[in-house]
Amino acid sequence: MRISAKSLFAFAIIVLTAFAQPVAAAESGLLKGTLDRLLSAGKDMSGDASEAKDTGTDKQTTNQTTAQVPTSREQIQLSYAPIVKRVAGSVVNVYAAREVVQRSPFAGDPFFERFFGPNGFGLPQRRKQQSLGSGVVVSRDGVILTNNHVVDKMDEVKVALSDGREFECKILLRDKKSDLAVLKINGKVNLQPIEIGDSDQVQVGDLVLAIGNPFGVGQTVTSGIVSAVSRSLRGINDYGYFIQTDAAINPGNSGGALVDMNGRLIGINSAIYSRTGSYIGLGYAIPSNMTQVILRSAKTGKPVVRPWLGADFQTVSSDIAESIGMDHPGGAIITSVVKKGPAEEVGLKAGDVVLAINGQPVANADNLGYRLDTAGVGTDAEFKVLSQGREKTVDIALAAPPETVPREAIELPRDSILAGASIANLSPAVAMEAGISTDKTGVVVTDVARNSSAAANGIRPGDILREVNGVEMDRTKDVDKITRQRQRAWQFVVERSGRMFVFERNGGFFRQYVQ
């Protein structure tokens, strides 16, 4: 009777379990010798089983691989502990807070203030809003990477190290588009920085560890594999470009480290896909190559400047691919080109498809934006393009977007019907910051305060103000002037994602519709 390797190894485990009580030294040695002999026999029989399969019928494939059992005590005792020991000190807990003033939703409304006065609704209520997340130490003097949504609009930031020490921090840089932020510990410290790896070398199936502070329980390590790369997940940042992993990530892990088996940082854990709010196997991390872009900008003390091509792009769908004669969907197709922009100067035009940048494939429009930003302003990028059925290569000098008109950015004051809205004159530079098409002109809303009059009247960041009470808005000073007027009825026409929306306010009555 032939005994399979699998059965023999299961018998070895049963023997170990049965004798898992304190034994004399001689008995312990005997058990060790028995285990070694069983493992050695299992290895031999595993080879026999493989040979038996190879000599089977024609219906069996000869190249089929078989599972192998551990062949030594050392293999049974393999552990992630050395990697964790190396990098755990580089991951910190991040605590952020701010004071929020809650006003009545009717405050600032001219109709109600006429009868009750500006303070007729009682004094504003103040409360403390807190945020919890994780961070990664990237320099000995206390520079820390985390997610922007962890510290966004926060006034106080504190980090706790793995050894229990706590420090207050200042925020060096917030970048909403990438959802990354850079912190700096106040005072002199000597910390353990993590090594930053090349996320372009990450492959599906690679083993990874996620380290962070889920639910505030303390530093926690989980393991998994890379489930996908260049994954799109809109709503988290403006790229939709992530490393997907099945290593458990939960609320509080945001800003923590995703590391490879060499202990190198390959991503910043940022989000999960879940219908319950807890981990269900889909976690997402911002690639480490994007963190390098943010760190370079933090050193200059200036906001991140991204390359401008002077063109708008759309992902090539299956329908588009079929219409232009492509074998399969992929790449980013040019939908419009700005006159005298970098794209037009090298001969690119609407209908051309960008397939790769600097040898890296461009799967969709999100990929293209990521590749441009990681290449950086001031470099030359090689574009592989499909134009009229033929592939060609063009080089483009990546430059910063121009500010063709002064932005004249202002925040509308309290006496404005759109109080709480920040606005600016549109140019390619402002349009890229706002995440809208670079060929637009007019006045764009760059930010809207929560619970503000502007928010109550339907205004959102990224809206282009076209008309207020029938008057066209060309500059920020026009918006500021007309919205300060004391009127009961208001009408706002805004362009949002290529559609025209109308918002009407008449005292306490409000409605909106698509024009």
Image (spheres, rainbow, N blue to C red):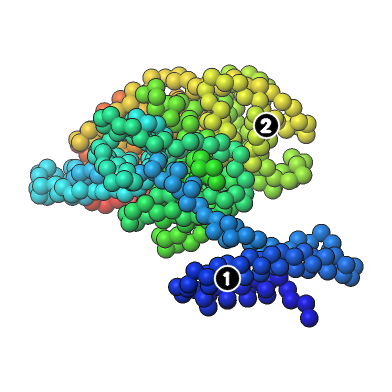
The C terminus appears in which quarter of the rendering? top left
> Is there any visible trace of residue 513 in the rendered image?
no
Question: Circle 1 — which element?
Answer: helix
- What kind of residue is marked 2? Gly
Residue located 63% across and 76% down the image: 11
Residue located 58% across and 60% down the image: 73
Of the numbered discs 2 and 1, the one sitting upstream in the chain is 1
x%, y% of residue 76?
A: 57, 61
Q: Foreground: 283 or 212?
A: 212
x%, y% of residue 186?
A: 26, 31
Q: Foreground: 21 or 485?
A: 21
Q: Quadrant of residue 176?
A: top left
Residue located 53% across and 26% down the image: 376
Residue located 40% across and 41% down the image: 90
> Looking at the image, do the residues carrying marks 2 and 1 touch, with CB atoms under 8 Å apart?
no
Number of other residues with Cα within 10 Å of mark 1, as a class: few under 14, some 14 to 19, many 20 or more:
few
Q: Which residue is mark 2?
A: 359
> Going by the image, does 437 lie left or right of 493?
right
x%, y% of residue 135?
A: 38, 42
Q: Foreground: 182 or 362?
A: 182
Q: Is residue 140 above or below residue 154?
A: above
- What kind of residue is marked 1? Leu
Question: Circle 2 — which element?
Answer: loop
> Is there any visible trace of residue 126 in the rendered image?
yes
Number of other residues with Cα within 10 Å of mark 2, as a class: few under 14, some 14 to 19, many 20 or more:
few
Furthest toward the bottom, the residue is: 1
Q: Quadrant of residue 408?
A: top left
Q: Which residue is mark 1?
A: 30
Q: Is residue 109 above or below residue 370?
A: below
* Residue 393, disc: none
Furthest toward the front, the residue is: 26
Tell me how far mark 2 sits from mark 1, CA to CA: 60 Å
